[in-house]
Image (cartoon, rainbow, N blue to C red):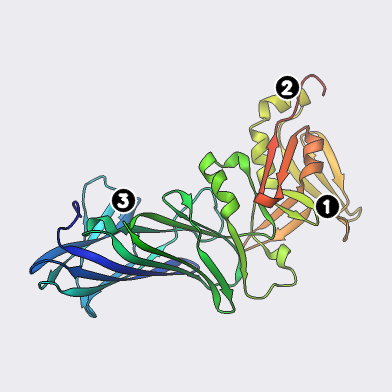
Amino acid sequence: MRGEHHSIAMQSERIVIVAGAKDYQTEVNFVFRNDGPKTSVQMGFPENIDSGEGSFSRFSTWVDGRQTKARRVRVAPYSAVSYWLKTVDFAAHQTRRVRVSYFAPWGNNTSFPNGPSELVYNFTGQGWKGRVARSDLEIRVKEPELWMALPSFNGKALPMSFANRREGAVFRKTWRNWQAQGTFLFDLEFTVPLWMQDSSDLDSDLLALVPHVRTFRIGAVPKDALMRSPDAPGFVRDGVAYVALWHLRNRLEGFSYQLEKHRGFKPEVALHWNSKRRIATLMAGSQPVDFTPEVGTPHRPLLLRSRGYNTLYVPLADACKTLGLTWKVDAQNHLFEIKRGTWTGKS
């Protein structure tokens, strides 16, 4: 835990993480070798601190197949990490196998807010003698849904092999002869087909990561797949870009002063449905714009039903034209952008 150990080397580690709906289970198998005389070493497995408490709901550890007690210690009063500590004895030139298993709830990620969100694994190989010969990481996702996933390591997109079978999706990565030090993050959330993020909501680091997001489905495609999908800022369907009404409201709030000064209305947006006329009206202050959401008409509002909530979407171009906004769509990289436009005088 303090510098590199002079005789104990981590030969290998195998990490298997199973993503569940409410938490994720991590199991790690280490192989350690003592290159020196008889010694004892204190091993500390890191746990992130969340709101003053640890993030593990369950933790167990074994040495050579025998379960061993470990105590949780916070290294410093304001440290963001605590450690599960145990002492392991090594005979001269002995190899020992250490296993760790824990459950942890999904962490919050404000950039990808839907669904499970974010899991983390901290590699700590630099505390041991020399380099780690091999590290194997495997992520398993089994729950049926349309998913988007982003693996990253130390803030950069991490290429992982990917296989999607009937029993679920598997991401894999192997490192060889490396320092084995750094933070692995795996963002996972529900999404809609051909989803898009608003580039204005992402900083430069996240913008660089978005093109590396992998979208995949587990299970059969339901007949009403799009209508059952969860929230997303935007998506593309039949060549038409759509924006969520809640997201359009949020963007308009940032333009409130200019809108009221140059366009004569406050950014109050709502969508009303007239069942007799079969007309949907987007109200932007005092300016209405009508849509006719008939089946087969691409430029129509859509209601997506999700896990406990509904989301209204409107065609991005039609809404922006009415509001005097400018927009840009990069469907290939799942990005769109809304700008305030040229609000001068009555233009």
Taking the view exactly as shown, the residue that stands out farthest to the top is 345
Q: Earlier in the sequence, mark 3 or mark 2?
A: 3
Whether tag 3 and tag 2 are in contact, CB under 8 A, the answer is no
Q: Which mark is residue 300?
A: 1
Q: In the rendered view, would you say 297 is above or below 98?
A: above
- Residue 269 vertical placement versus 1 (above, below): above
Amino acid at circle 1:
Arg
Quarter containing the C terminus: top right
Q: Quadrant of residue 88?
A: bottom left
Residue 136 spot, x, y in % from top left:
39, 68
- Three-letter amino acid code at disc 2? Lys
For label 1, the crowd category at 10 Å Cα-Cα, with few meaning under 14, some 14 to 19 and many 20 or more, is: many
Is 65 displayed left or right of 213 in the figure?
left
Dot 3 corresponds to which residue? 52
| Secondary structure of residue under mark 1 | loop
Q: Please state which amino acid type lies under the numbered disc 3.
A: Gly
Query: Which image quadrant for residue 133?
Result: bottom left
Residue 75 to residue 7: above or below: above
Q: Earlier in the sequence, mark 1 or mark 3?
A: 3
Q: Are marks 1 and 3 in contact (CB under 8 Å)?
A: no
Note whether residue 234 is visible: no
- Identify the residue position indicated by label 2 in the image: 261
Position of residue 245 measured from the top left corner of the image (x, y, whole percent): 70, 47
Task: Determine whether the residue tagged by mark 3 lies in a helix, strand or loop.
Answer: loop
